[in-house]
Image: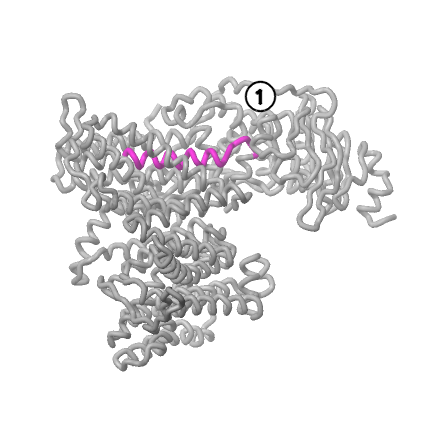
Amino acid sequence: MDLSIAAFLTQDGVTNGAIYALLALALVLVFTVTRIIWIPSGEFVTYGTLTLAGLQLGKPPGTVGLLIGVAVVAALVESFATVRNGEWRRLPARLALWLGIPLLIAAAIWWAAPRAFPLPVQVLLTLAAVTALGPLLYRIVYQPIADASVLVLLIVSVAVHFALTGLGLWFFGAEGSRTPPFTGASFQLDAMTFSAQSLFVVATSVVLIGALYVFFGRSLYGKALRATAVNRIGARLVGISPSFAGALTFVLAALLCAFCGVLIGPITTIYYDSGFLVSLKGFVGAIIGGLVSYPLAAAGALLVGLLEAFSSFWASAFKEVIVFTLIIPVLLWRSLTTRHHEEDD
Amino acid sequence: MSIPGARIASIAFAVALFALPLVAPPFWVTLGNYIGLYSIVALGLVLLTGVAGQTSFGQAAFVGLGAYTTAYLTTHFGASPWLTLPAGLAITLVVALALGFITLRMQGHYLPLATIAWGISLFFLFGNLDWLGGHTGVTGIPPLTLGPIDLKDERRFYLLIWAIALAALWATHNLLDSRQGRALRALKGGLEMAEAFGVNAARLKITAFVYAALLACVSGWLYAHLQRFVNPTPFGINQGIEYLFMAVVGGAGSVWGAIIGATLITLLKQVLQDVLPRLLGRAGNFEIVVFGILMILLLQFARNGVGPWFSRWLPKRRPPPVPDAPGLSARAHARRHAGALLEVRSARKQFGGLVAVNDLTFDIRAGEILGLIGPNGAGKSTTFALISGALSLTAGDVVFRGESIGSREPYRIARLGIARTFQHVRLLPQMPVLDNVALGAYLRGRAGVARASLRLDRDEERRTRAVAARAIARVGLAGHQHDDAVSLPLGKQRIVEIARALAADPSLLLLDEPAAGLRYLEKQALAELLRSLQREGMTILLVEHDMEFVMGLTDRLIVMDFGEKLAEGAPIEIQRDPLVLEAYLGGV
């Protein structure tokens, strides 16, 4: 290996690592606020890519049907809860929220699909559709069992992953898709070639991480989420609804994952079932941060990206083996350096 | 003696099971074979997930380890399959021990995450190693022979699979009904309590994980010789997830749940794979959508699985009376000890900037009842936790019979002869009082997992039950020994806590507010009980709020306020101490 190959692999690794970092942040966010180990995050990445790919082809992507279906179920669940609590008057507002908004987004995509809008518009539509799925799924699946143990929530997450993968096959088909890069430009610096797309990915990740930092540090909603993460019951006592915190968390997390999908689309071909491995790479990063630390999770994700790039050069057949075996020394290190107390639940 | 209904049901099940290959068409025998193989894996998960509260998505990888080991050794070296089984078990043991050691000392969610990663790694490893045939796999695995009997025929293989499955079921059932089984059941929801009675929880969790992994390995070995070829597909992560679904669907609390779950999921998958593609007009593994939704609904509405629906139809077995048996031998510690039994030396506990216990020094003399009192927030409970090992000291030391215990884990402290009760009752709610109390005698038994599985622990078990029954009778709850702990009123649950501590045969008894929630007469009975224990040589430390109770009972009192010792002396002196009066009444 010479320096130029090393530089190329590093660029590749940092680009992938930046995407995994976004994912790892979403996973840490979801875990700290809701205690959910969000395995199905990968399907949101997949949906992001496949939705954009559909729009590129000028036909309405499967997301439209999926969104309508999920929204109808969420609306039914919400209506049932509302009626049971005797809150008839609130029903229209809630239906507008849980059914109306998703249907509007679905309609917009349906309308926009054949019209070949420029890429940024299609990206915005994609983000809107996939982001909407986050809180809808939280409402249907997790909110009714928000107090269950971490273990139960984890098994449910795996079940959701199963369901979403199968639904992905149904709504998007078995073919793989790629999306066009935002820019094909590249430029030379000394002997090294940088692709503008890589820089774009890294810059986007940095901007999003910065935006999250501001959101959590400055905004009231961000502080409410942080409070919930620190102490669920305490947050509830000062008026932060756990359901609201959960739904908001899933809006943010789904948005981050959809963004990952848009960013990863030009790099790898994405199939309906590619998400699982992607999300697990995010998890390896997040676990390096103990599932609680944002900076460590981002650093861990970067490490995963680099490891993946270099191992695909040396032993491409064993790329996944190497990346996932990394979790063992990481866990060993964590188990030896931190003192743990089992939660009793 | 009449034959209990549950036994009739088991026998009927066994007869039907073994008659199946004689009468059923081959398709059903094949299905039966798979159900048997899956049941063996699910059984391990019942123990790991349903009982011990841990979980693994990587069981399929252990199945693969068993299958590939025998596939490789029999085809490359012509080894006998009966020798490759121990080889596979040995490899599985090493891998499971390593994974368990790394993850099980940490919080519960690291094990499942690690097993997902390990499952995927192994899947890709199988698929990419040329000497294991890559994605095509290994063919030409020899059939099993049992002496002169050739098990090539599926119907004969069926008998072997189910003989092993039932043996595993029997062993697991025995294990749950034993000393280690009680400790295992306590891991989920009663971890701190179990450790206070000497259970090494981390080690026991690893044991459960290894047990489940070994069962999976056996299933893989059988699979390889049934199919006579292996490739990576059936050992992937999706199969690992389905194994867990089987355990959850069946109801992870009972061993029968494994068979029920394996049967339901296998049949459902068969039907769905048949129906869904025709319904949707497309091929693909759409059954995972149904499985996923089914699991979500099940965990939302019936977290105990469908197993309980089946057991409702079985006649309920009346618990047999506890036969009288000689007790377990007394613990090897002297009741009598000259001087101070326990010394607290400048103990200090800080939580960040808050000093909860500030250089506290006192001792407990052998044979006395010492009371620790003080207003709310004085640091009594923290002190209690420092002595029992539930919290670690910031500085200072605690010395028990000349040995420093300040930095020991609770289960090591328990071994020295200290038993405790909990301020917030820590009983296993769904377990009978008798089993709850028997858990207290954990350190007085010896039987391990292997002995219990083979039912070689019955003598010790009889003695343990006798000890538990006596402790229950002693605290006056003889009529309640078969009731579930949760069915007792809170006051009585506190008394059960004392019985459990007595079953440990301690030399020092630590009681955390035992009189809270008791009525007047119950309090009197409790005081009488504690006095009689004292006459037998027991030393007792009492943290209590109820002044009347404490004043009449204790020999000496330590009064704490703001983390420090305010006063020390006989109750009568304490009542007159101006400092104490000021602390309680705000000055007079």
Camera-side residue of B87 and B324: B87
Q: How is the image coloured?
A: one colour
Chief secondary structure of the magenta portion: helix
Camera-side residue of A111 and B185: A111
Task: Classify the position of the N terminus of chain B by image quarter.
Answer: top left
Camera-side residue of B568 and B61: B61
Q: Is residue B106 magenta?
A: no
Q: Is residue A76 visible?
A: no
Camera-side residue of B348 and B558: B348
Residue B325: where, in percent of width, then height? Answer: 49, 19
Q: Residue furthest front?
A: A190
Q: Quadrant of residue B338?
A: top right
Q: Is residue A81 visible?
A: yes
Question: As drawn, is B52 to the left or to the right of B528?
Answer: left
Residue A82: where, in percent of width, then height? Answer: 44, 68
Residue at 20%, 29% in the rendered image: B77
Circle 1: residue type? Arg
SS class of the residue under badge 1? loop
Residue B555: where, in percent of width, then height? Answer: 76, 29
Question: As drawn, is A21 to the left or to the right of B340?
Answer: left
Range of magenta residues: B196-218
Q: Please state the chain letter of the residue tagged with numbered disc 1 in the rendered image.
A: B
Residue B399: where, in percent of width, then height? Answer: 68, 29
Q: Quadrant of residue B293?
A: bottom left
Residue at 47%, 63% in the rendered image: A246
Residue at 18%, 58% in the rendered image: B283
Residue that carries the numbered disc 1 in the rendered image: B331
Residue at 34%, 55% in the rendered image: A277
Q: Is residue B202 magenta?
A: yes
Question: As drawn, is A137 to the left or to the right of B264?
Answer: right
- Badge 1, how many Cα within 10 Å: few under 14, some, many 20+? some
